Amino acid sequence: MPAAALKPKPSRTQSTAQHPVLFDSPVQPVTKCPLPAGRPREWYVTHNRRLKAMRLAIALLDSGVYFPSQAPDATIRSTAQDIGMRPPSATTCHMVRAFMRYSR
């Protein structure tokens, strides 16, 4: 029997990600598709900022931060570091709180 067959495979409960993960989800990740071409640069910047803010808002809600008043910039930035994301700008932090405000 080859040596590779004897090596145990990682279980679903073990994370194989390089960055720390808050939880292991049984749901498959969404497949990414290219963004539409021909839009102004400002549209792409805003789109990516919204995606980042949404990921951070979800991570904060999953970690028990339910109200915008519980999420100062420092908390949002530490959560970004926990999930392996670059620290967000003040504008993105403001957007995260706005998403949390409307999630109720």
Image (cartoon, rainbow, N blue to C red):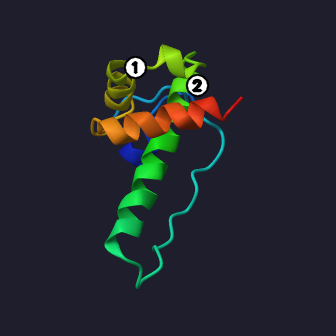
- How far across and how far down the image is residue 30, in percent? 58, 56
Q: What residue type is labelled 1?
A: Pro
Q: Which residue in the rendered view is the most extreme toward the right?
A: 104
Classify residue 100 as left or right of residue 3.
Answer: right
N-terminal of the two: label 1 or label 2?
Answer: 2
- Is there any visible trace of residue 12 in the rendered image? no
Along the viewing direction, whichever of 19 and 80 lies nearer the viewer = 80
Classify residue 11 as left or right of residue 19.
Answer: right
- Tag of residue 72: 1
- How far across and how far down the image is residue 31, in percent? 55, 62
The kind of secondary structure element at disc 2 is helix
- How far across and how far down the image is residue 85, in percent? 33, 39
Quadrant (top left/top right/bottom left/bottom right) for the C terminus? top right
Residue at position x 51%, y 16% in the image:
69
- Tag of residue 28: none
Q: Assess disc 2: are there few (<14), some (14-19) or many (≥20) residues with their C-alpha within 10 Å of its C-alpha.
A: few
Image label count = 2
User: Label 2, on which residue?
Assistant: 61
- How far across and how far down the image is residue 97, in percent? 50, 31
Q: What residue type is labelled 2?
A: Leu
User: What's the CA distance linking mark 1 and mark 2?
Assistant: 14 Å
- Is there any visible trace of residue 14 in the rendered image? yes
Residue at position x 58%, y 25% in the image:
61
The nearer-to-camera label among 1 and 2 is 1
Vertical comparison of 25 with 51: above or below: above
The kind of secondary structure element at disc 1 is loop
Vertical comparison of 47 with 56: above or below: below
Residue at position x 45%, y 30% in the image:
21
Classify residue 98 as left or right of residue 75.
Answer: right
